[in-house]
């Protein structure tokens, strides 16, 4: 029987779920059965009434919720950490407002996040929340992170040519947002720099993030190892590349 996950990670999209799931399975297989990862199918940052609020409300309404830990990992994009945390706090407050409307027992506290990697507790349910953000160098999302940790001996000639294309269309007043460009770079890199000619004949099966993470060694997680540090306090121990990798490698002094 598969154990009921006592820890849930909510991530922004499909690729985030693929990445975190594969990483967990490879590096911490014995822990993977205890941690559930769910993608939100995207998120609307313009309103607290969003997919994250709906998912939190659903989780808090489910049985076996007590003593569960819920980690939230969203893209930082071009926002600041403070802005993203404020957005998540507004979303948590909205979720709890909906619980009140549904005649749940009186809520003692609405948890308020202050910083990354620190648990806050929903006391009436004994549920804890923590948050972190996917980025590289303080901005961006998963695609930016993967681009940065691409192995140096793996060519990205085709994907890198997109920079010239972007400049070209820019001269015609066609602007491509950074987020869209990062995703395009990753897709072209996988399809034309990583996949073989034969694999491209069945690109849907072979030229995608899930397949290359499983079958191809193209990302370097083993440069300049950190000492094992903790993601979401006691969530799970991780050993990942320290250079510009703040999503994973935290200041150890914060957890002593």
Image (cartoon, rainbow, N blue to C red):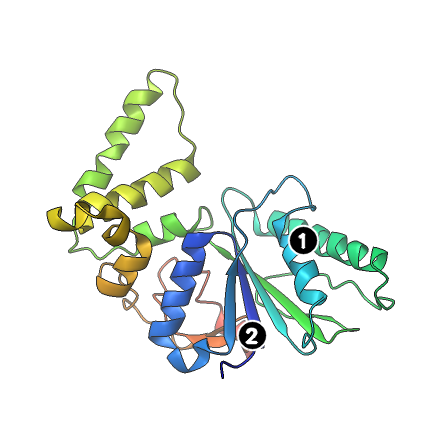
Task: Determine whether, in the image, residue 106 is placed left or right of residue 182.
Answer: right
| Horizontal side, residue 195 vs residue 52: left or right | left
Q: Quadrant of the C terminus?
A: bottom right
Q: Residue furthest left?
A: 197
Residue 218: quarter of image:
bottom left
Place of residue 18 in the rendered image (x, y in percent of width and height, measured from the top left): 40, 60
How far across and how far down the image is residue 241, in percent? 34, 65
Q: Who's the residue at 84% across and 55% down the image?
A: 101
The relative height of residue 231 versus residue 167 in the rendered view (above or below) is below
Q: How dense is the environment of label 2, judged by Cα within 10 Å: few (below 14), some, or many (20 and up)?
A: some
Residue in front for this viewpoint, 27 or 34: 34
Classify mark 1: residues with Cα within 10 Å, few (<14), some (14-19) or many (20+).
Answer: many
The residue at the far top in this view is 172
Q: Quadrant of residue 166?
A: top left
Q: Secondary structure at mark 2?
A: loop
- Look at 19% across and 43% down and name the residue there: 192
- Under tag 1, what secondary structure? helix
Mark 1 sits on what residue?
Answer: 53
**Does residue 249 appear in the picture of this structure?**
yes
Give the camera-side residue of 224 and 75. Answer: 75
Out of 64 and 255, give the one closest to the viewer: 64
Residue 188 to residue 53: above or below: above
Residue 131 location in percent, x, y?
Answer: 58, 62
Residue at the image position 51 percent from the left and 42 percent from the top: 78
What label does residue 66 carry, if any? none
Q: Which residue is mark 2?
A: 233
Task: Between label 2 and label 1, give the one nearer the viewer.
Answer: 1
2 or 1: tag closer to the N-terminus: 1
At horizontal 56% and vertical 69% (from top left) the residue drawn is 8
Q: Position of residue 186 (x, y in %)?
A: 31, 45
Q: For the image shown, how many numbered marks are present on the structure?
A: 2
Distance between the alpha carbons at the discs numbered 2 and 1: 23 Å
């Amino acid at each position: 029987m598969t154990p009921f996950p006592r820890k849930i990670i909510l991530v922004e999209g499909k690729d985030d779920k693929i990445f975190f799931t594969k990483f967990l399975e490879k590096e911490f297989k014995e822990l993977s059965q205890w941690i559930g990862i769910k993608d939100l199918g995207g998120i609307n940052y313009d309103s607290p009434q969003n997919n994250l609020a709906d998912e939190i409300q659903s989780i808090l309404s489910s049985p076996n919720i007590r003593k569960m830990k819920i980690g939230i990992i969203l893209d930082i994009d071009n926002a600041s950490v403070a802005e993203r945390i404020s957005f998540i706090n507004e979303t948590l407050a909205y979720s709890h407002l909906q619980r009140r409307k549904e005649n749940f027992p009186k809520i003692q506290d609405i948890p308020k996040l202050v910083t990354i990697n620190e648990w806050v507790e929903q006391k009436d349910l004994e549920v804890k929340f923590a948050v972190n953000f996917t980025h590289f160098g303080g901005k961006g999302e998963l695609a930016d992170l993967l681009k940065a940790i691409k192995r140096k001996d793996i060519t990205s000639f085709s994907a890198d040519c997109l920079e010239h294309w972007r400049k070209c269309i820019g001269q015609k007043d066609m602007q491509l947002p950074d987020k869209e460009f990062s995703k395009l770079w990753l897709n072209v890199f996988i399809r034309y720099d990583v996949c073989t000619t034969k694999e491209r004949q069945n690109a849907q099966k072979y030229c995608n993030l899930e397949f290359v993470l499983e079958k191809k060694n193209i990302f370097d997680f083993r440069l300049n190892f950190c000492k094992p540090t903790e993601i979401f306090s006691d969530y799970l121990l991780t050993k990942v590349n320290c250079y510009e990798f703040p999503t994973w490698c935290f200041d150890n002094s914060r957890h002593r």
